[in-house]
Each structure stands twice: as structure tokens, then as C-alpha cells.
Image (tube, rainbow, N blue to C red):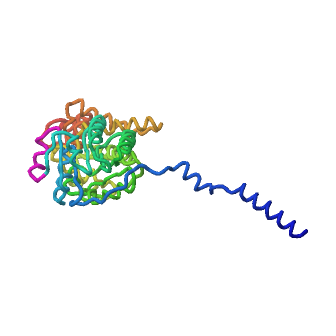
């Protein structure tokens, strides 16, 4: 009797266990919601194994390419204005006739072009011929949504993409001290370290598009900082302060900034050569304004800076550097910081 009871009890327990045994929730959830990634595994990057391509050899790109050449990488370059790529050809780079040709000859392709429309066109050409396992790195300041689209297109081609816009201007590009905001697969970003380290310091910001979002936040910060710097200079001028001494004094305190370091002296010398073009900054701030509209946020400083830079463009000064903002504020106040100019001299006495 006792044995019969025990056997029946065991049978019931066994049946209950079978009916209630399931895949652990966490594992089941992972299997359902995280299918195996189609992102190709990164390959080691080195001068002996990696062929590099570069599209866009302007103010920034030319210096960044030079670091790659000096490190011993085989480099293929393309630029719409051939003369801007000539110095790199003289240093040993191969000059291609199209973005597609660059892609066909490269394992990793960098792009740094002007506008989102350029990015869309160039990256489409690159992905049409980039080999499976190849990597596309867009360093243009562009639209985060476009970066996500490019990432999806790259994966569909068994390639990878990283959005990696930079900050630091022409001086940072020449010195190899740029800040690189990277978005994409972390393994791919990490695999590119041997190349990124030649140009500056890399900060992994998150998945596709996050590098672009970080760069837009950077541009918003720079825009208001530049307005503040120049307004301070105009006030100091009207107060009859010695401007070079004033800039030196504030550089040691809380008003010190990278904008002051890079552009204060240039503004005093009326040096408006572009380290970063007004035209491109207007584009960047325009993208920022649209992103803010999507997010439902209001950034008045961004709006003001955007309008001031647009006024430079309206005066035909889009080809100057961002420090030329002083011209807009000089016109607004009928003064000039140029000691050789008579503009506004009467009103500043």
C-alpha cells in the first residue's frame, strides 16, 4: 500500500514537472528578440593588411590623410576638385577617378564631404563596390537619421558602417588631436583604433547615429560660445580696453575656451581663412534646428547663432571661417575691431 502511494505520488510529481518546465524567461526572450547579428566580424587593421580609401580631401581631410600615409598605409583618395588631392598624390597616395573606384580598391573607406545630400550619394556609390566585410566610416557632420539608414544599407551588403564626425578644426587635423565621436557597432569601432589614433582621440557614443548626435550637441555648444566670445570682444572694444591684453586675461579664467584659444588671435588679425567654413556651419546648425523640432525642445542660443551665421552667408561670406562671425556683430553695432578701419570709430570714442 505504502509503495503504491509513493509510486503514484512520484508519477504525479514527474508529470507536473514536465508540464511546467519551460525555457528560462531571460534566455527565451534573448532568443526571440535578439537574433544572431548579421554584422560582419571586424578584421585586424594594420598597414600590412589594410587598404584605406578616402573621399573628400578638403581643409580637414587632407591633413587627416597625411597621417595615414605617414603611418605606412596604402591609400587611395578621391576629391571632386582634383587639385586639392594633388599634395596627397605627391606623398604617395593613389588618385582615383570616382568614389566607386576608391571602394573597389579599399578595405576601409573614409568619407568627409560637405552636405547630407553628398553623404547619401557618395556612400551609395561606395557600398555598391565595397567588398563584403569592408567598413565605411563617414566623418562628415550629417543627419543622425541618415547615419542609421547608411548602417542598415551597409549590413545588407555584408559590410559595416560607422558615423564618426570630428571636432578640433584644421589645427586639430594637422596635429592629430581631433575629438572623434563614434557611433556604430562597438567591435567595429574598436577595430578601427589603429586608424583613429592617428587622427586624435575616439569617444564611443553608442549605436548608429549617436556619433552624429554628439557632434550636433558639440556644434550647438560652439555656436553659443563663439557668440559670447565676440560679444565680449565688442564690449571690451567699446570700453576702450586693450583687446590683446583682455583676451590674455580672460583665457586664464572661467571665460577661457577652445574657441578663444583657436580664434581670438585670428579675429584680432582679421584672419578669416577657413578652418571650418561658414557655409558648412550654417548647414550643421540647420540640422541642429531640425533635430530640436523633432525632439520638441527650444534652444534660443542655437536659434540666434543660426540667424547670425545666415546673415554672413547672405553677405557672400560663406567661404570664410566661422570666426568671421565678428563681421556680423560689427555690422549690427556699427563698430570694427580692425584698428586700421574707420568704421564706427566715431561711436567708440
Q: Which stretch appears magenta?
A: 80-92
Q: Which quarter of the picture shows residue 78?
A: top left
Image position of 96 with respect to 253: above or below = above
Q: Main secondary structure of the magenta part?
A: helix
Q: Which quarter of the picture shows residue 338?
A: top left
Figure quadrant of the N terminus: bottom right
Q: Is residue 41 magenta?
A: no
- Coordinates of residue 99 in the picture (x, y in percent): 22, 40
Determine whether, in the image, residue 174 is placed left or right of residue 83: right
Furthest residue to the top?
Answer: 314
- Coordinates of residue 286 in the picture (x, y in percent): 34, 35
Q: Is residue 82 magenta?
A: yes
Give the residue displayed 35% in from the left and 58% down from the top: 190
Give the residue displayed 23% in from the left and 37% down from the top: 330
Decide if residue 249 is in sight here: no
Image position of 102 with respect to 25: above or below = above
Decide if residue 300 is in sight here: yes
Determine whether, in the image, residue 68 is placed left or right of residue 201: left
Amino acid at each position: 500500500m505504502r509503495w503504491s502511494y509513493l509510486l503514484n505520488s512520484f508519477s504525479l510529481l514527474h508529470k507536473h514537472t514536465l508540464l511546467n518546465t519551460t525555457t528560462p524567461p531571460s534566455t527565451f526572450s534573448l532568443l526571440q528578440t535578439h537574433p544572431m547579428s548579421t554584422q560582419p566580424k571586424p578584421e585586424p587593421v594594420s598597414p600590412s593588411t589594410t587598404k584605406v580609401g578616402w573621399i573628400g580631401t578638403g581643409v580637414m581631410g587632407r591633413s587627416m590623410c597625411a597621417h595615414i600615409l605617414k603611418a605606412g598605409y596604402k591609400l587611395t583618395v578621391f576629391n571632386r576638385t582634383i587639385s586639392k588631392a594633388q599634395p596627397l598624390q605627391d606623398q604617395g597616395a593613389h588618385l582615383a577617378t570616382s568614389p566607386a573606384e576608391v571602394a573597389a580598391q579599399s578595405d576601409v573607406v573614409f568619407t568627409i564631404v560637405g552636405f547630407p545630400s553628398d553623404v547619401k550619394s557618395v556612400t551609395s556609390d561606395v557600398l555598391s563596390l565595397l567588398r563584403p566585410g569592408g567598413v565605411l566610416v563617414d566623418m562628415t557632420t550629417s543627419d543622425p537619421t541618415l547615419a542609421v539608414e547608411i548602417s542598415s544599407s551597409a549590413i545588407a551588403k555584408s559590410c559595416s558602417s560607422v558615423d564618426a564626425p570630428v571636432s578640433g578644426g584644421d589645427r586639430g587635423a594637422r596635429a592629430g588631436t581631433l575629438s572623434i565621436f563614434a557611433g556604430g557597432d562597438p567591435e567595429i569601432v574598436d577595430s578601427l583604433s589603429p586608424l583613429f589614433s592617428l587622427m586624435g582621440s575616439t569617444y564611443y557614443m553608442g549605436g548608429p547615429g549617436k556619433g552624429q548626435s554628439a557632434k550636433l550637441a558639440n556644434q550647438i555648444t560652439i555656436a553659443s560660445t563663439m557668440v559670447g566670445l565676440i560679444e565680449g570682444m565688442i564690449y571690451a572694444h567699446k570700453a576702450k580696453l586693450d583687446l590683446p591684453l583682455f583676451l590674455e586675461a580672460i583665457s586664464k579664467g572661467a571665460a577661457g575656451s577652445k574657441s578663444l584659444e583657436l580664434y581670438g588671435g585670428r579675429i584680432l588679425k582679421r584672419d578669416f581663412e577657413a578652418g571650418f567654413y561658414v557655409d558648412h556651419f550654417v548647414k550643421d546648425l540647420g540640422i541642429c534646428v531640425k533635430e530640436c523640432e523633432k525632439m520638441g525642445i527650444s534652444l534660443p542660443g542655437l536659434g540666434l547663432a543660426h540667424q547670425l551665421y545666415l546673415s554672413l552667408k547672405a553677405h557672400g561670406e560663406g567661404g570664410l571661417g566661422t570666426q568671421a562671425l565678428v563681421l556680423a556683430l560689427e555690422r549690427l553695432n556699427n563698430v570694427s575691431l580692425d584698428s586700421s578701419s574707420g568704421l564706427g570709430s566715431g561711436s567708440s570714442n
